[in-house]
Amino acid sequence: MDQVTIVTGGSRGIGAATAVRLATAVRLGGDGHRVAIGYERSADAAAALVASIEAAGGTAVAVRADTSVEDDVVRLFATAADALGPVTGLVNNAGTTSRIGPFTDLTAADLRRVVDVNIVGAFLCAREAARVLPRGGAVVNVSSAAATLGSPGEYIHYAATKAALDTLTIGLSKELGPAGIRVNGVAPGIIRTEIHAVSGDPDRADRAGPAAPLGRPGEPSEVAEAIAWLLSPAASYVTGTTVRVAGGR
Ligand code: NAP
């Protein structure tokens, strides 16, 4: 099967590493994907990523889509199919958080935005995938180790949205299993990306990463590797599970 995969939030961090990993898999001796890179604001980064994938012999397209907006999500899937062919996979990766801090400081606006992107957006993307994926298709939801740790003193609301994503993985895997579509997740620990700057703590990976049993933060490429495996035929009997990529956290 030709693999055409949408990576939401593919302009930076874990999503960008995943798009590169999937699109260049042919060079690694595996099945390459044609990749649609979704982004919200980073048009230049997304365009540069497409150029670097094409320079390496892969095929990619960048599509602006705020995943919390239903029309954008529908357009993302339609544009990907028009440009690349029938969509066979989704990496449900776009996510955000708000400022690190005690629960008492949480504002309603921050809570709503995090729920909007991490739950509403991810669920809308999964719904579109469920509508179009063929037998043999696969979804990988990008959760977080926070879902089981709770993130006290940092962002409990963010952790809770990721727990909701884990429930989506379980329920949707059972609903789509008979159609031959697999649904899994990855739960990264502390990974070196710009999300920590978004939460007002740009040095968090270097500060908190060494406390993990493996003694360091993770790299986006290490999460991408697990995602690529879950999408691949090598994981043909794996569904409804979330693989922790968290250095032991
Ligand atoms: P990142 O470097 O901040 O990148 C976030 C990506 O999501 C960007 O491509 C961004 O697009 C996109 N995005 C954000 N809001 C969006 C929206 N409303 N619509 C569409 N795209 C949107 O973050 P990251 O660390 O790679 O995180 C990727 C995923 O991993 C997230 O779901 C995050 O919760 C999860 N995660 C990360 C860590 C970690 O330590 N880094 C740990 C556990 C889980 P623009 O560039 O256009 O803004």
Image: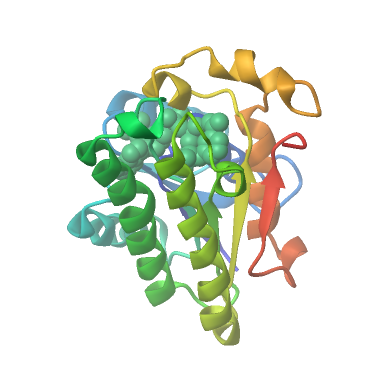
Name the quadrant containing residue 238.
Answer: bottom right
Nearest the eye: 103 or 89: 103
Taking the image as drawn, is residue 46 in sight?
yes
Q: Residue at x 74, y 27 (%)?
A: 212
Name the quadrant containing residue 84.
Answer: bottom left
Q: How many marks?
A: 0
Left/right placement of residue 178 relative to residue 217 reads left
Taking the image as drawn, is residue 14 in sight?
no
Quadrant containing the C terminus in the rendered view: top right
Nearest the eye: 101 or 142: 101
Farthest residue in the bottom direction? 178
In x, y percent, where is residue 243? 69, 52
Left/right placement of residue 32 relative to residue 67 reads right
Q: Residue at x 38, y 34 (%)?
A: 103
In x, y percent, where is residue 206? 62, 14
Q: Residue at x 81, y 27 (%)?
A: 214
Nearest the eye: 207 or 38: 207
Farthest residue in the right direction? 214
Left/right placement of residue 47 relative to residue 56 reads left
Nearest the eye: 222 or 218: 218
In x, y percent, where is residue 74? 25, 62
Scheme of colours in the image: rainbow
Q: Residue at x 25, y 46 (%)?
A: 112
Q: Quadrant of ligand 1?
A: top left
Quadrant containing the N terminus in the rendered view: bottom right
In x, y percent, where is residue 186? 62, 50
